[in-house]
Amino acid sequence: MDDTQIAGDLSRVLFTSEQIAERMAEVAAQIDADYRGKELLLVGVLNGAVMVMADLSRELTSHCRMDWMAISSYGSGTQSSGVVRILKDLNTDISGMHVLVVEDIIDTGLTLSYLIGNLMSRNPASLKVMTAFRKPEAARNAVDVAYVGFDIPSEFVVGYGLDYDGHYRNLTSVATLAPHIYS
Ligand code: XMP
Ligand code: MG
């Protein structure tokens, strides 16, 4: 669904599907160049990274493998705590592999820090992170992210895999929600 079909739910469109597609192609070209001659394992973080994984992987011009993890972060309300539980682990033994974690959005980076520590203990040949969106808090916390689609303001956004109460993941653009949706 696109933003015109649910205009009443939305406050502001930050990125259209065309802008997202263009940026994902640019990031994929960078990844292609950086990993030339190496085989990459893309690790998507469920559920939010489904869209970015689908788009990014198909823009790559070399072979890659894909695997998925599902994690849940314990926290009070909408604050992430950095305490993470693995709901679904990888099917792949990543030791000796070049791993690129594919994320939807990084806010504080606490969830990601846990994930990186966990994956590093499995001895990959290399481990980097790509995220579609990044909020300012992550930049302040010096979270090491190799590839960023877009830096965005510290606002709650939906679409392109990102949800509010399970909805809006299938919105093709990325937008903020109208205040009446939260009440
Ligand atoms: P931290 O703070 O650990 O949190 O980097 C990252 C996770 O928080 C969720 N998150 C969002 N989800 N719209 C969403 O739909 C947002 O604007 C947003 N900001 C953070 C998301 O699950 C992410 O993985
Ligand atoms: Mg996520």
Image (tube, grey):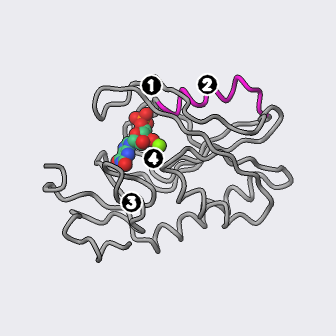
Badge 1 or badge 3: first in the primary sequence: 1
Q: Nearer the viewer, residue 97 or 138?
A: 97
For mark 1, what is the residue? 82
Amino acid residing under circle 3:
Gly
Which quadrant would residue 50 be assigned to in this image? bottom right
- The verdict on residue 114 being magenta is yes
Whether residues under marks 1 and 3 lie with C-beta atoms below 8 angstroms apart, the answer is: no
Residue named by callout 4:
105
Marks 1 and 4 sit apart, C-alpha to C-alpha, by 15 Å
Q: Is residue 6 above or below residue 126?
A: below
Residue 121 position within the rendered picture, expressed as x and y whole percent measured from the top left:
70, 22
The residue carrying pointer 4 sits among few (fewer than 14), some (14 to 19) or many (20 or more) residues within 10 Å by Cα, namely many
Which of the two labelled residues, at mark 1 and mark 4, occupies the earlier sequence position? 1
Three-letter amino acid code of the residue under disc 1:
Gly
Q: Residue at x 49, y 26 (%)?
A: 84
Amino acid at the residue labelled 2: Gly
- Find residue 70 and report its horizontal and vertical position in percent: 55, 39
Mark toward the viewer: 2 or 3? 3
Is the Cβ of the residue at disc 2 closer than 8 Å to that at disc 3? no
Q: Earlier in the sequence, mark 3 or mark 4?
A: 4
Q: Find disc 3 in the rendering and name its residue.
A: 159
The residue stretch that appears in magenta: 111-124
Would the CB of label 4 be found within 8 Å of ligand 1? yes
* SS type, badge 3: loop
Establish whether ligand 1 lies closer than 8 Å to the Cβ of label 1.
Answer: yes
Q: Is residue 50 magenta?
A: no
> Distance between the Cα atoms at labels 3 and 4?
11 Å
Residue labelled with disc 2: 117
Hey, which quadrant is residue 37 in on the image?
Answer: bottom right
